[in-house]
Amino acid sequence: MLHTILSCLAFLAATLLQPEVKQETQPAARPSAPPATAMSPLSFKMKLIDGKEQDLAAYKGKVVIIVNVASKCGYTAQYEHLEALYKAKKDAGLVILGFPANNFGGQEPGTNEEVAKFCKDKFGVTFPMFEKISVKGDDAHPLYKSLAALPAPLGGEPKWNFTKFIIARDGAVVARFDAKKRGGLEDGLVEKIDELLAAK
C-alpha cells in the first residue's frame, strides 16, 4: 500500500515539475488583397501624333470611340466614314481617338508625320490622332493591354485594323465592333453611339 502511494506521489511530482508547453498558434490569416481591376482606358496619358501629351481623362463625359487605324488596309476607307460620323456627332459629345498601328500585315509602315499627312490630305481627318503604338502582343501599349483584359465579349486583342472600342460617358467600355465593312461602318455602331449620346 505504501509503495502504491509513493508511486502516485512520484508521478504527481514529475507531472507538476514539467515545464508548461505552450500550444502553437497559427498566425492570423492576412486579409486577401482585393482583386485587381482593369484600368479605365481614360486613365492613360498618350502622345498625340504631333508629340504633345494628351490626358485621356479630358474625354470623360463624352462618348468615345477608340480605334486602331492603318493607311494601307482594306478598311482604310473607313477613315472617311469615321470623320463624317465625328463631324455629325461631335457637338453632341462624340470623340474619336485614332491610334495608328503596324501590327497587321505591315499596313501602317509610315512615320507619325507621314500618317498625319495621309489622314489630312486623303480623308480630311480632324478627330484626334495619336502616335503609332503596338496594339497586340507582348509590346502592346498598356492602353490596349487594359482593353484586351476586359471580359468577353468586349475584351481580347484587336483581330485586325479598325477595331472599335466604345466608351460611355462614365468612362466604361460598353461595346466593341470588329471591322467588317470596307465601304462603311459596322451595322449597329451608329445606333449604339446615338443611344449613348442620348444618355445624359
Image: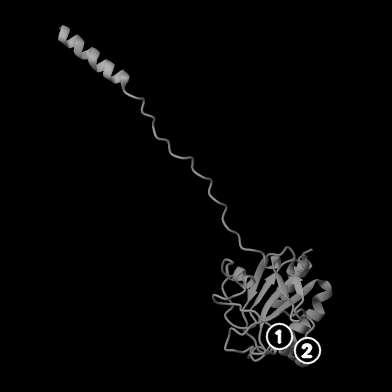
Q: Quadrant of the C terminus?
A: bottom right
Q: Say whether marks 1 and 2 touch (CB < 8 Å).
A: no
Q: Can the viewer see residue 154 in this picture?
A: no
Q: Nearer the viewer, residue 180 or 38?
A: 38
Residue 192: horizontal and vertical position, in percent?
Answer: 71, 73
Q: Can the viewer see residue 143 in this picture?
A: yes
Residue 174: horizontal and vertical position, in percent?
Answer: 66, 67
Left or right: where 195 falls relative to 28: right
Q: Nearer the viewer, residue 194 or 117?
A: 117
Q: Quadrant of residue 68?
A: bottom right
The residue positioned 24% from the left and 17% from the top of the image is 11
The residue positioned 64% from the left and 63% from the top of the image is 39
The residue positioned 29% from the left and 20% from the top of the image is 15
In this view, 85 is above or below 194: below
The Cα–Cα distance between marks 1 and 2, rounded to whole angstroms, is: 12 Å
The extreme top residue here reads 2
* Amino acid type indicated by mark 2: Lys
Residue 57: horizontal and vertical position, in percent?
Answer: 75, 66
Q: Quadrant of residue 194?
A: bottom right
* Mark number displayed over residue 112: 1
Looking at the image, tell me whether mark 1 or mark 2 is earlier in sequence order. 1
* Mark number displayed over residue 120: 2
In this view, 128 is above or below 14: below
In this view, 42 is above or below 135: above
SS for callout 2: helix
The number of numbered badges drawn on the structure is 2
Left or right: where 177 falls relative to 127: left
* Mark number displayed over residue 177: none
SS for callout 1: helix
